[in-house]
Amino acid sequence: MAIQFCGPCGNTLDISSASIVRCDCCGSMNKNNLFDGIVTVSSTNNFPSELRRKRQPTQHLQCLAAEDTWATAEETCRKCGAKEVRYTALQLRSADEGTTLFYYCPGCLERILDGTKVTEQQSQEYVIQYLQRLKTTPWRLV
């Protein structure tokens, strides 16, 4: 059911079959347009959201680029043998699957994605593909 608002004060108007509806707040008379067949469509893009802004690719790419903020793990680098590498995790797949680990060796700049050697470009492409899937996958409330 549609909601009508008073033109002068913005108060919600009562639902009525009369052609004119009186506002209980300011007393003005408003045309009843409930039965005019007007259809209004809203989209989530009409309502800015801090969470939606945070899902933008640039933020995830900045996260991947800031290796100095990554956690440290006592893993041996396969390329240079360094005893310590940095890592970060992103949830790139569905929630019932594990997170994707991105490893980075500060010594030789080697990048490894879940045990597979990748370039910086490839790791960025993984994140962008994930974000594109998020935009096309409808949210389900359980």
Image (cartoon, helix red, strand yellow):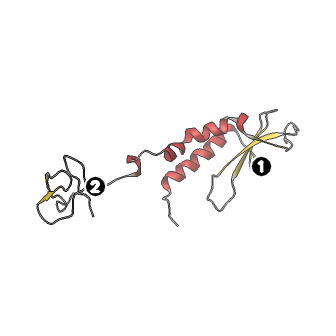
Q: Residue at x 53, y 49 (%)?
A: 132
Report how far apart the C-alphas of labels 2 and 1 lie in the structure: 50 Å
Measured as percent of width and height from the top left, residue 70 is found at: 73, 39
How packed mark 2 is, by other alpha carbons closer than 10 Å (few <14, some 14-19, many 20 or more), is few
Measured as percent of width and height from the top left, residue 58 is found at: 56, 38
Measured as percent of width and height from the top left, residue 65 is found at: 66, 35
39 or 127, which is in the foreground?
39
Measured as percent of width and height from the top left, residue 45 is found at: 40, 47
Q: Are marks 2 and 1 in contact (CB under 8 Å)?
A: no
How packed mark 1 is, by other alpha carbons closer than 10 Å (few <14, some 14-19, many 20 or more), is few
Determine whether 122 is above or below 6 in the image: above
Q: Residue at x 49, y 46 (%)?
A: 52
Determine whether 142 is above or below 75 in the image: below
Q: To which residue does mark 1 refer?
A: 115
Name the kind of residue labelled 1 in the image.
Answer: Gly
The label on residue 77 is: none
79 relative to 14 in the view: left or right: right
Kind of element beneath mark 1: loop
Q: To which residue does mark 2 refer?
A: 40
Kind of element beneath mark 2: loop
Badge nearest the viewer, 2 or 1:
2
106 relative to 1 in the view: left or right: right
